[in-house]
Image (spheres, rainbow, N blue to C red):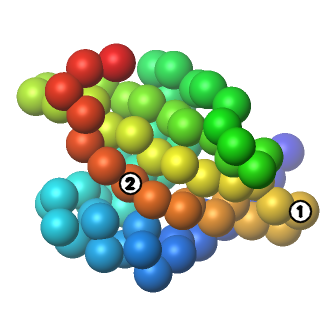
Amino acid sequence: MKAKPVHYARHARSRMRQHHISEESVNLTIREPDQLLSSIKGRYNAFKRTANRVIRVTFTEEADRILVITVSPRRRL
């Protein structure tokens, strides 16, 4: 199965710049999360532990793409 392309909402891009989180980190969090939880409105929260923090990515899976809504750092899972 071919992986769906990842698209970013303007808010997500802004948060990525603000918190110095790369596209590569976001993609890895979506594709290989340490924890994946359902959220509101059919969204998901994916969590991935890195060397010094946890990244949370809120996204929705659409028919032809994955849309990243927001990205934020967390201190722990």
The CA span between labels 1 and 2 is 21 Å
Residue 52 in view of the camera: yes
Secondary element under disc 2, as helix, strand or loop, is: strand
From the viewer's side, name the closer residue of 34 and 41. 41
From the viewer's side, name the closer residue of 2 and 12. 12
Residue at 55% over, 37% down: 45
Three-letter residue code for mark 2? Val
The residue labelled by disc 1 is 63
Of the image marks 1 and 2, the number of the one nearer the N terminus: 1
From the viewer's side, name the closer residue of 27 and 55. 55
The residue labelled by disc 2 is 71
Is the residue 18 above or below the residue 72 in the image?
Answer: below
Is the residue 13 above or below the residue 2 in the image?
Answer: below
Residue at 70% over, 54% down: 60
Secondary element under disc 1, as helix, strand or loop, is: loop
- Residue 36 location, quadrant: top right
Is the residue 62 above or below the residue 47 in the image?
Answer: below
Quarter of the picture holding the C terminus: top left
Q: Whole-percent x and y of residue 13?
A: 37, 74
Mark 1 in CB contact with mark 2 (< 8 angstroms): no
Of tags 1 and 2, the one toward the viewer is 2
Residue 3 in view of the camera: no
